[in-house]
Amino acid sequence: MSSSIASLTAGLTPQQILALQGQNHDVEVYTCAIVFSVLSILAVAMRVTSRHMKRFALEIDDVLVMFALVISLAQTIYICIGVRNYGLGRHLWTLNETQFANFNKLWYTVGTLQCTALLMTKISLLILYHRIFITPGFRLATKVLGVVMILWWIGTFLADTLICIPISSNWDPTVPAHCGNKQLLAKIPPIPWIATDLIVLLMPVPMVWKLHLPRLQRIGLAGLFLLGGLATFASCYRYSLLFYQPEDVTYNLIPASIWTIIEIDVTIITVCLIVSRPWLLRIFPSRLVSLVHKKLASVRKSLSNRANNSPSPGGSQRRWLFSSFRRIEETPPAITAASVGAPFEFDVEKGMGMETKRGRMGRD
């Protein structure tokens, strides 16, 4: 550590060193931690109360999301403790040996907590997919992908833990140790995680698009699933920040620390929003929906008048457009019943099953 400090402070005057000692990023980390922790707690609360509003018991995927939230909050609190006590966000040369050891222990633990929480949210989403999509091939794909992610998590955990022997040398540089390639270990594991993010993100889109629903509703359902793209973006950006490890590690890891908090909380939020439609309907009042319906009705009436007053060879196209607006405005009873709850819960599970079977029967 002393050689690193000497290289970092080379060329700086005592006045410059003294001025840099007071630099920190406490406010940024605390603000991010509070905002995203509150949002993730609210999202999980919306998910759980949505189940209660529909009189459904909690499923295993709900329990996994709640465990992921607990791990996320523990990780966020630990990062804030690191900012306050362990020198995270301060220049390396301002830390003593104890602080630097505690910082290494912090970063070592955060990596494990992050992977575990992300695994729980992904498995939760795969369980949801398995429950609502009845196609055997799709269900087999969710099982295979789940097993692959669990095995990769086990391998990553063991590699992180055993990269240096004894294990305490991972955070205490004074302990003699035999270590593997730490830089390679830091760069390789996130790649499969991001790849599985993309697979989980895109898996339901073809299934949703095959449903016998109006195009507008299919776009809405697919868009709800694709909210996970926000989490994928956060994962990619965080990985880009960690790819190159700076020398002044305690000071320059602040952006990565902030995006570590954002990544897991955004993942939890997006997973919860998928099954929280009762709350979304309250947040976006029905008056907004009725306004859209009125606009559609006025357009439909206008098209009807034009079709009646000005018959032309294109009349069939107008009638087709007219019927399209009617299908949007006059929602089928099964879909109307599902609209009061989450779009991917019990009613829609049955609806999706019936629609999928109907599509297969039509093809047969």
Image (cartoon, rainbow, N blue to C red):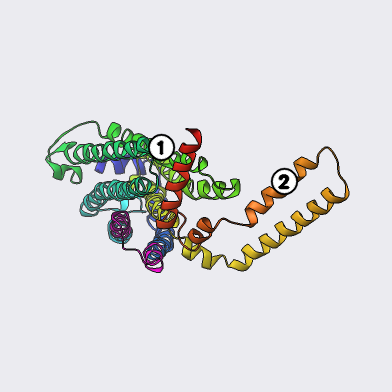
Q: Is residue 146 above or below residue 98?
A: above
Residue carrying label 2: 321
Q: Residue at x 71, y 57 (%)?
A: 296
Q: Position of residue 89 (x, y in %)?
A: 37, 53
Residue carrying label 1: 199
Which region is colored magenta?
47-76
Task: Give the camera-side residue of 187 and 300.
Answer: 300
Task: Give the camera-side residue of 230 and 331.
Answer: 331
Q: Residue at x 22, y 53 (%)?
A: 102
Check if mark 2's residue and mark 1's residue have beta carbons within 8 Å: no
Q: Residue at x 46, y 40 (%)?
A: 207
Callout 1, which amino acid?
A: Ile
Residue 325 is left or right of residue 1, and the answer is right
Q: Position of residue 104 (x, y in %)?
A: 24, 48
Residue 361 is left or right of residue 90, and the answer is right
Which secondary structure lies at badge 2?
helix
Of the 4 image quadrants, the one containing the N terminus is: top left
Q: Quadrant of residue 173?
A: top left
In this rendering, does residue 152 appear at all? yes
Does 165 lie within the magenta span? no
Callout 2, which amino acid?
A: Leu
